[in-house]
Image (spheres, rainbow, N blue to C red):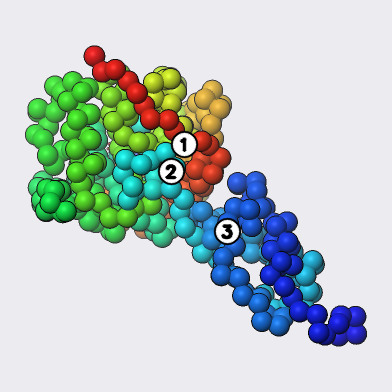
Amino acid sequence: MFFRNSSSSITEKQVLAALGHVDDPDLKRDLVTLGMIQDLKIEGKQISFSVVLTTPACPMKEAIRNACLNAIRLMVDKEAEVRINMTSKVTADPGNQALPQVKNIIAVSSGKGGVGKSTVSVNLAVALSRLGARVGLVDADIYGPSIPILMGIGQERPRLAQIDGKEMLVPFERMGIEIMSIGLLVPPDQAVVWRGPMASKALKQLIFDTAWSNLDYLIVDLPPGTGDLHLTLVQALPVTGAVVVTTPQQVAVAAARKGAEMFRNPQIRVPLLGVIENMAWFSPDDAPEKQYFLFGQHGGQQLADALQIPVLGRIPIRQAVSAGDDAGLPERVLQDPVLEPAFRSLGEEVARHLAIRNATQPPPSKVQVAMG
Ligand code: ADP
């Protein structure tokens, strides 16, 4: 009171100047420039605004809130009463114009089968959905579509609906996730003999002719391996980023590396978001703190280093994944004290790296390939 002129009132300009000193740690630009400060209101010494982050459940949320508070106290008025509403809005891939109601398409790939690609796809979808995002899941693994089983849909056939005069597939919904699988449309014995262009046509149909609602993330579980089929599958979709699943085993790492290089093919150029190391160690139920490295150690990190991308998560081997019947996998994972935090953290990292990608990279150019 003594030092301040009581008639001087706080202005919007002062507040924004102070918040202009607070950087988003990932995007490395200030919150004002990034357009993250919204609904700013000032009444006397009361200041309120929203900080709109780009990922749901951002791990840096509290640090950003405190930085805003300190900036205002330090640079505007140390007695200001500040109310900050921390919210989030997932950013969209600027390069995806083909499927406008989907903000980000994530391709889940692996060099070889059996490394847990489908297990990871399902539980990543659940983790992102539990963080508050709208999520869809597509099973594109024509060799062995397993997502309907893992998500408890079984052999049900999808419904068709007329939407804006067009016949569309209605996705299934489980645990708040919209699901569609190539296995629900074609008998598996036919799909295995498909050539690349046929499979890519079916996948295109599956994705573009499904009546998705507005989704933050659409996860696509690709078939394992690399080759013409994969090339055409990835070319068919506006993929925002790909993740690579591997075990720490050298044979899996070598195959994953080959697979990952496909995404860097000049005809494709899909950004690689990072590596997911599955079966990283085994933790027994009666001693979950113990770690047995059955398949060796550091394989995921080696792959990440070779590709110069981060490790997004490490998932241990747990009985909850493989034990019992296959129905209810996500529920078992959510109840597991080791897997639940591992997948939650994986979801946060995937969301974070997509947000960084969307903020820092130019939109992917449209793939133009002559298909022979
Ligand atoms: P992919 O899709 O790569 O072929 P799956 O997701 O079908 O692999 O997994 C292969 C097998 O390994 C399945 O039987 C699955 O239950 C098991 N599995 C995958 N990840 C784990 C894990 N973290 N812990 C225990 N079993 C796992």
Q: Are marks 2 and 1 in contact (CB under 8 Å)?
A: yes
Question: Residue 158's x, y, as percent?
Answer: 12, 49
Q: Is residue 286 visible?
A: no
Q: Amino acid at mark 2?
A: Asp
Q: Nearer the viewer, residue 292 or 154?
A: 154
Q: Is residue 250 visible?
A: yes
Picture residue at 60% right of the left edge, 47% below the top: 26
Question: Residue 72's x, y, as percent?
Answer: 74, 68
Q: Which mark is residue 36?
A: 3
The Cα atoms of the two marked residues, 2 and 1, are separated by: 7 Å
The Cα atoms of the two marked residues, 2 and 3, are separated by: 17 Å
The Cα atoms of the two marked residues, 1 and 3, are separated by: 21 Å
Question: Residue 241's x, y, as percent?
Answer: 43, 36
Mark 1 residue element: loop
Where, quadrant-wise, is the C terminus in this rendering?
A: top left
Q: Amino acid at mark 3?
A: Met
**Quick check: 92 above or below 190?**
below
Q: Which mark is residue 363?
A: 1
Q: Earlier in the sequence, mark 2 or mark 1?
A: 2
Q: Can you name the residue that lies furthest to the right here?
A: 2
Other residues around mark 3 within 10 Å, as few (<14) / some (14–19) / many (≥20): some
Q: Earlier in the sequence, mark 2 or mark 3?
A: 3
Mark 2 residue element: loop
Q: Are marks 2 and 3 in contact (CB under 8 Å)?
A: no
Q: Which mark is residue 93?
A: 2
60 horizontally vs 112: left or right: right
